[in-house]
Amino acid sequence: MDLIKIIRENKLIYLNVDRLSKELAKITGEAEIDIRNQINDLINDGTLYVDDQNKISISADKGFFKAKMTLNRKGYGFANVEGYPDFFIPAFAINGAYDGDDCLVEIISRKSDDEIEGKVVKVLRHNTTHIVGTYIVGKSKNVVFPDDDRLPQIRILKNDSKNAKNNEKVWVELDAETIDSKEVCGKIVEILGQANTPKAEQLSIIRSFKLIDQFDLDTLKEARAISQIVDKANFSQRIDFTSQRVITIDGEDARDFDDAIAVEKIESGYKLFVHIADVSEYVKENSHLDKEAFRRGTSVYFSNQVIPMLPKELSNGVCSLSEGTDRLVLSVVIDLNNDCDVLNSKIVEGVIHSHHRMTYTEIKNILEGDNFLIEKYQDVYNDILLYQDISNKLQKKRHARGEIRMNIPEPYILENESGEIVSIEKRVQDEAHQIIESLMILTNECVAKTFFDLKLPFVYRVHEKSDSEKVLRLSELLKNMGVANQLQIDGDKPMSYQKIIESIKGNPSETTLTKLILRSMMKARYTPSCLGHFGLASEYYCHFTSPIRRYPDLMIHRIIKNYLRGVPIQDLKLKYTSIVARASIQSSETEKVADEAEREVDDYKKALYMTKFIGEQFVGTISGVQEFGIFVELDNGVEGLVRLEDLPSDEYVYDESVMTLKGEKNHYTIGDSVRVIVANSNIRLRQIDFDLVGVEKNTLGNFVVKKKDKKSKKSTRKSVKISKTKNTKRKKKR
């Protein structure tokens, strides 16, 4: 029954709940109490709106939109409204909303289709139930100051303090009845440790992102009941691969091994075996293990800690393809010709026995001619050369079809056993990494195409092309920076991006420009629809190769095994169509949260590390330019801000189209090399400040910045007040 339709047709607006319930009960013939409950549900979810006089109207008819709020630390926010660009919500129009709240918003001004300003009309649901903060014992009252300074301080009564000590980090449950009052109260549910210690700060980030770092007893009980021994005699229906020269290749610090490989050289080319841990054999559908894996969606990786998707009994135990042990696998057998075209592929259930647990470093050194390692791994040395040959050919094929390969070095944080950060350095993928990457990409493509052709429900990994506006903006920016491109014409083709990246190789701004290209592109996600992978220039793609640490892989393993065991296609469609849709959404969301938490921990550790270098000089590259200053990235990947007020006194023009700050005497643009001094490292804000070497601190109270208008290309002047305590931080778009 559509109550909204009935209300509209009968013009039943501006009535109170009692009156509206009676009128609708008469029309529908339903019990008044049932109607009242439905009305309250519609009010709670924002479909109906109750004004100050308790009169009800339809929210949409009043121009109100349901939205999810995202608040900036400076006080303003954005409302995510389905079907619209984000509404900008000024600080004065937040009206008590917290970050992440569900709200009703309305438009208060509209400059263009892409520039909408709104205000919060009503908070429908406060989604912040817990906060992380620092407990401070005061003379008259005790409070917690949230790490997220968009939230108010929380009063803690003595009985709710859990005997926390002054300046300890705590996890607080908010009192829902006080959340909209002037004084919000709460109770401490967990003490995380002394503030400003690495362990407490990392745990604070884990809690603030609501990551689950402990397994419940039911899940652990299931995991511990699983035998760690695989007796292949009990799996006679599986193909026995235990005599194959199977190896795993992972990092030195890897603890779980979910992929293994073997190869044969045959007359027509190569026969490749990619063996993936058969996690679905142990994680049964709707079990506690399955529900917990779905809830987590992914493992989360920090420099010194892993929060696994599955308990260690599986992730480091029976599901890990450890050296010298029999393990159950789903195997993809791929026949390739000598040019590495796929002749055919099939998926089978198998049992393997890994002969060697090898590392990327060992493979790299073997390929570079390390005689000791060649002798040590003599039994698989020729196989390693075959993997290299296959990988090189696959890379060439991906390049020919337009793969966008961005070799952006990633900062690697090295810590000692006591948790002290020893160093931060950039690391790039070497040939050993590329071998495994090539084989896994090929496997994922083969699996995705197989099940697309079968028209079965599936979870695909998709990467869509950028929207036309972003393509146009990037094209103009690159051209203004002297990088020729055809994006305005061929922006929907991966090859056009590939040509740009190849054209800037060796350019001093290569890394910075590559990051600009990356930020202009869509994020990959999971979906039941096979939409292709733009970055890989691949028509069919999924994630199949890491079921220990990613739920989508586990989900499709389950579908694959049901199909292999003869479950009718129609039954699989009925059973899994809705499940893969839910899994796709959940996995995309949990992946996003994991990425953000990993970045937050990395930013904290970078800031902590750089406190040791206050006053020291470094050479860096300008990685970003804004009205408020320039961002400089050091050779180790640490980035800091030189604030506008700390640049030489000048009249600057900020030109967004070329990302420059240009004065009469000074000029700053991305890619420029500069020498900086570490001025400050704010651990709480995860923010590092630099000063330029040889530049005196600006002592002026005001100076002028001009910004070029995007549309008119004219410059507009604005006076910028300089404050030595100004705290400006870039909103990163990743």
Image: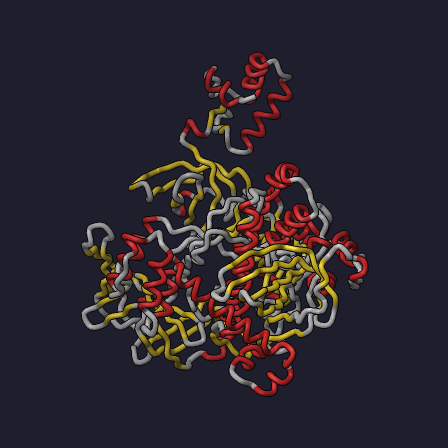
Residue, x 33% and y 53% (percent of image)? 491
- Say left or right for 138 vs 488: right
The mark total stands at 0
Q: Please, is residue 155 above or below residue 638 in the view?
A: above
Rendered location of residue 400, percent (x, y): 39, 62
**Snapshot quadrant of residue 376:** bottom right
**Snapshot quadrant of residue 497:** bottom left
Rendered location of residue 469, percent (x, y): 32, 49
The quadrant of the rendering that contains the C terminus is bottom left
- Say left or right for 451 vs 84: right
* Colour mode of the rendering: secondary structure
Q: Please, is residue 352 above or below residue 74 in the view?
A: below
Examine the rendering and report whether any part of residue 692 can be seen: yes
Q: Please, is residue 439 above or below residue 673 in the view?
A: above
Examine the rendering and report whether any part of residue 581 can be seen: no
Direction front: furthest residue: 267
The quadrant of the rendering that contains the N terminus is top right
Rendered location of residue 590, percent (x, y): 57, 52
Residue, x 23% and y 50% (percent of image)? 711
152 or 494, nearer to the observer: 494
96 or 404, nearer to the observer: 404
- Say left or right for 74 vs 263: left
Residue, x 21% and y 55% (percent of image)? 716
Rendered location of residue 688, percent (x, y): 43, 70
